[in-house]
Amino acid sequence: MDGITTSSSFRQWDQLRKDETDRNQETVFAGIEKEDEKHLVSNGSLDVRGRIADKRKTGGWKASPFIIVNEAAERLAFYAIAVSMVSYLVLEMHQSLPVAATHVTDWIGAAFVLTLLGAFVADAYLGRFLTIMVFSCIYAVGMVLLTISASIDSLRPPPCVGRVCVPATKNQTAFLYCSLALIALGTGGIKPCVSSFGADQFDETDEKEVYKKYSFFNWFFFAINIGALLGITVLVYVQVQKGYGWGFGIPTVAMFSSIAILAAGIPFYRYQKPMGSAFTRFIQVGVAAVKNHLKGAEVHRETVLFEVETKESDISGAARKLSRTEQYRFLDKAAVITNHEADTTNRWNICTVTQVEECKSFIRVLPVWASTIALAISFAQLSTFFISQASIMDRNLGSSFLIPAGSIPVFASINALILVPIYEGWMVPILRRQTGHRRGITSLQRMGVGLFVSIFATISAAVVEKRRKDHYPMQFSMSVFWLLPQFFLMGSAEVFTYVGQLEFFYDEATDGTRSLSSAMFLSEIGIGAWLSTAIVSIIQKATGGEEKGWLRNKLNESRLDYFYWLLTAINVANFFIYLWVAWVYKGRDAVGSTVSDEAVVDDKNLTTEDPNKV
């Protein structure tokens, strides 16, 4: 009996010990899980295996270098083409200078406007990373076709004999334009996704990573200019020395390299799921708001609006819900509950507060977007008339080296390469101490500085062109270095405005509109290029055409300085418009939530809440 009791006691003691061990292990595992949770991102990003991304293994500066180097390689390819295409069309395809300049600005415009398509595909179907990879392959095919066009004689008209130049045939022109179209499509797909994909590598709720994100934007822009610098110096020199076949072939290799570099970072990236088309959601908000308005719905400060009961929003891939704001109150009617028995899953009839606020955020940035387009008009001249000026000036460097005309934009790129590190490492800390702002100055202020500087860039261009004209017919007596101020100032304007736009449009975007916001500011570069084409066309028609007008086939007979003064007037008017827009602008943080949580009802409480409660 004692043996049985002893055995039973032992078993009980052994069981208690096991239970205690299990509890200790559970406590340890719980502690480990809790500790691991601290290292998981909070923005819904996933790793390559589809799990919530771990900050210790993914993102940040572990992933960013692949994206930055990829951007540098892709921009090298793009700028090697952009700065050479006018001369290629004139010298190889026998087009007139104004026509060639128009075609190049149209092509650049298409490349940047197509970013809206890239953003749509990324958000609705593929996600940012796959969109970059797919459109990079399209881009590479276009580069191959362009290289073939420049390498095979039958795809170009024969060389000019004296002043007799046979124009390109329709088939030759179609082959060239097909290659350029594929390159524009590839660029459009890539550009809105790369900067956003890079910013996705930083968790906005982590204070340390937030600071690193804004450094990423600066170094991302630095990479763009590294690529541009190599494209407009080394590759333009190769074109002059070895021909356009080599000049376009090397960028083709660079494009394939950029794809390989981006793919090498796959294990380290943080990925966002596709969130559906933001454009569709915007239209749904408008349709639902109009429907409910016609039903007599009214919105007051305490009117109850619809929101899903889940912790996250019902926008696929967008984890965070948005609080209701008072701005654009008409759109709130899209979330007013007019029928308790209606299907709340049909977003064409009723939208959530988050979906309405997403639409509001997009509308809110449109005035800022529109008031910065004028800079893009001036910037378009870097690849056209600025280079045309350089081509008929003294480009000798020493006694034995002639600077290629297409390499002259290097002045703008070098300025950017110098200014970005100075701004990031020296100016930002000083400004931060003075203003208390974590970036020294706000994104809107930074864009304003760039727009102000652009005024002096076009003034300098007009003054220098007038002086150059005064030296005609001794056109080679004036050094090309007289163009340095206009390139330098335009490069400075780009540094301030472009990086400011990167920051601004990303900050003001919601989880579901990151790619679209990037596409928005990139598209204005394209629209600016198209507006430049329209202005050139209007000037030609209004002033006498290519034979008698301001912009003729021969630059020495043109009045390009008048064109630059017109751009200056546009920049001045636009600057004052921008000041007003920036002054009245209220961003997402400034608007804030002005409505209590009680004014938002979830679908669980639809049967107990009065939809028109005031």
Image: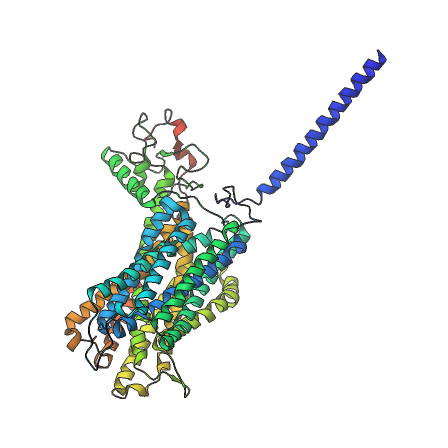
Location of the C terminus (image quadrant)? top left
Q: How is the image coloured?
A: rainbow
Residue 606 seen from this side: yes
- In this view, the residue farthest toward the top is 1
Q: Nearer the viewer, residue 212 or 552?
A: 552
Q: Quick one: quadrant of the N terminus? A: top right
Q: Is residue 406 above or below residue 534?
A: below
Q: Position of residue 482 (x, y in %)?
A: 35, 81
Report which quarter residue 226 is drawn in: bottom left
Please tell me which residue is depicted at 66% across the width and 34% down the height of the picture: 27
219 and 359: which is toward the camera: 219
Instruction: State the residue lying farthest toward the right.
Output: 2
Q: Percent position (x, y) of residue 485?
A: 37, 77
Which one is nearer the viewer's eye here, 251 or 105?
Answer: 251
Q: Is residue 558 above or below residue 131?
A: below
Relative to 569, does residue 313 appear above or below in the rendering? above
The spot of residue 326 in percent (x, y) is 35, 43
Q: In this orientation, does residue 299 appear?
A: no
Residue 482 lies, with reference to residue 588, above or below; the image says: below
User: How many marks on residues?
Assistant: 0
Please tell me in which quadrant of the rendered image residue 347 appears: top left
Viewer-nearest residue: 314 or 207: 314
For the point 19% across and 70% down, the residue is 539
Which residue corresponds to the image point at 37% horizontal and 59% vertical from the top-left? 140
Q: Is residue 291 left or right of residue 498?
A: left
Residue 72 drawn at (x, y percent)? 44, 63
